Image (cartoon, rainbow, N blue to C red):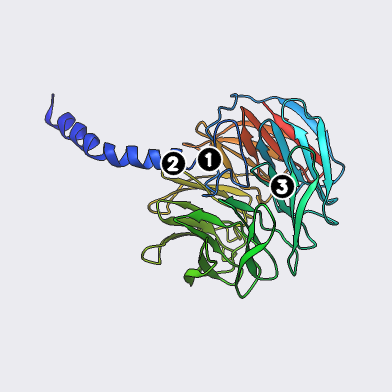
Amino acid sequence: MKRREFLITCAALATAPRALAFQAKTAAAAAPADAWPQFRGTPSLTGISATTIAPAPKLAWAWEGGEAFDSSAAIVDGVVYVGTATGELIAVGLADGKLRWRYKAGEAIGESSPAVAGGRVFIGDLLGVVHAVNVADGKAIWTFKTQSEIKSSPVVTGDTVLMGSYDGKLYGLHTATGKQQWAYATENYVHGTPCIAGGAAHFAGCDEVFHAVDLKTGREQLATSATAYTGASVAMLDGVAYFGTFDNQVLALDLKSRKVLWRYEHPDRKFPFYSSAAVIDGTVVLGGRDRMVHALDAKTGKARWTYMTRARIDSSPAIAGGRVFVGSNDGRLYALDLASGKVVWEHDEGAALSASPALAAGRIVIGSTEGRLLCFM
């Protein structure tokens, strides 16, 4: 073996444990192959699925809802759950696209996306009500009223469901009864969905503060600058939070040191980031209102690639099998190669796709602003 080949081999062996450790953490953060139980797939909000999607997915069915879908789907036990602009939570069969039941919530459900756990579906509406609904028949189990509209999505951890409200609070409610266990107050809307890691809920608020809240007590563990108004949810991996802001930047925030490890800003196009990031294999991927999908190096924040669509991207990407799935307001659902950013498949729906894709059981589910719930396989 030549000296140069020997040195390369030694270097590879030296870095292999770190690479394997990072891959193990990524795998642990992925949603199971057969389910997508909440917004972004798992409580760490990394947007990763263990499922396998066909190279060129075909439209399996389309359920006609008649009104816009801003809510993103959850998938559990072969059933799709999603909220509608008419204020209904619907359950549709994943295999056949047939309606199982519909539950009337408030006048409208916005971006709040359902979470499914323990035989219950949880969701918030624009009247500020949290709903717990029986998965079997769509009947109400309990409701809880906040003081303003809800656009945040619920996250279930243990016997607590977390929900943010535009009344400026993050609530911890008992999953079985809806009884308030605690409420954590901020100085502005709680729009993003809380990310769960290390016994705490993490979110970057509209008050420009990054918060960490103890899951048991609701007490503040951390409050540090998020640097800007933030509407996106935080993705968390290995003690680092990744999120975009309305100051046209993407940040990596180290929770231990409370320091911003890096900031990314496109050199030419200055637009907010509303899409929530997906994180896998050392890559951070998110959409921007600059119409671009951005893939960044998770350690340095440097751009690996960008892909330009024809309209802004509020949809949050989901990743499976080395491909990035994301909707755009140009009416297309894209599959991009994670390594290169090249388009490997797309579907032209002709209506904006601002909701985020859900991946499970070899299928992609996403709703359009024209009221069609789409399933590809």
- In this picture, residue 352 sits left or right of residue 279: right
- In this picture, residue 27 sits left or right of residue 180: left
Q: Amino acid at mark 1?
A: Ile
Residue 34 visible in the shown view: yes
In the image, residue 312 sits, relative to residue 350, either above or below, namely below
Report if the CB atoms under discs 2 and 1 are less than 8 Å apart: yes
Q: Residue at the location (50% across, 33% down)? A: 322
Q: Residue at the location (59% across, 24% down)? A: 55
Q: For numbered disc 3, what is the local secondary structure? A: loop
Residue 187: image tag: none
Distance between the Cα atoms at labels 1 and 3?
22 Å
Q: Nearer the viewer, mark 3 or mark 2?
A: 2
**The one of 282 and 358 positioned closer to us in this rendering:** 358
Q: Amino acid at mark 2?
A: Thr
Residue 166 in picture, x, y percent from top left:
70, 67
Could you tell which of marks 2 and 1 lies nearer the N-terminus?
2
Say which quarter of the image contains residue 21. top left
Q: Which residue is mark 1?
A: 48
Report if the CB atoms under discs 3 and 2 are less than 8 Å apart: no
Task: Count the labels in the image.
Answer: 3
For label 3, the crowd category at 10 Å Cα-Cα, with few meaning under 14, some 14 to 19 and many 20 or more, is many
Q: Quadrant of the C terminus?
A: top right
Q: For numbered disc 2, what is the local secondary structure? A: helix
For label 1, the crowd category at 10 Å Cα-Cα, with few meaning under 14, some 14 to 19 and many 20 or more, is many
Say which quarter of the image contains residue 374. top right
Q: For numbered disc 1, what is the local secondary structure? A: loop
Could you tell which of marks 3 and 2 lies nearer the N-terminus?
2
Q: Which residue is mark 2?
A: 26
Residue 286 in picture, x, y percent from top left:
56, 49
Q: Which residue is mark 3?
A: 329
Residue 121 in picture, x, y percent from top left:
70, 46
Report if the CB atoms under discs 1 and 3 are less than 8 Å apart: no
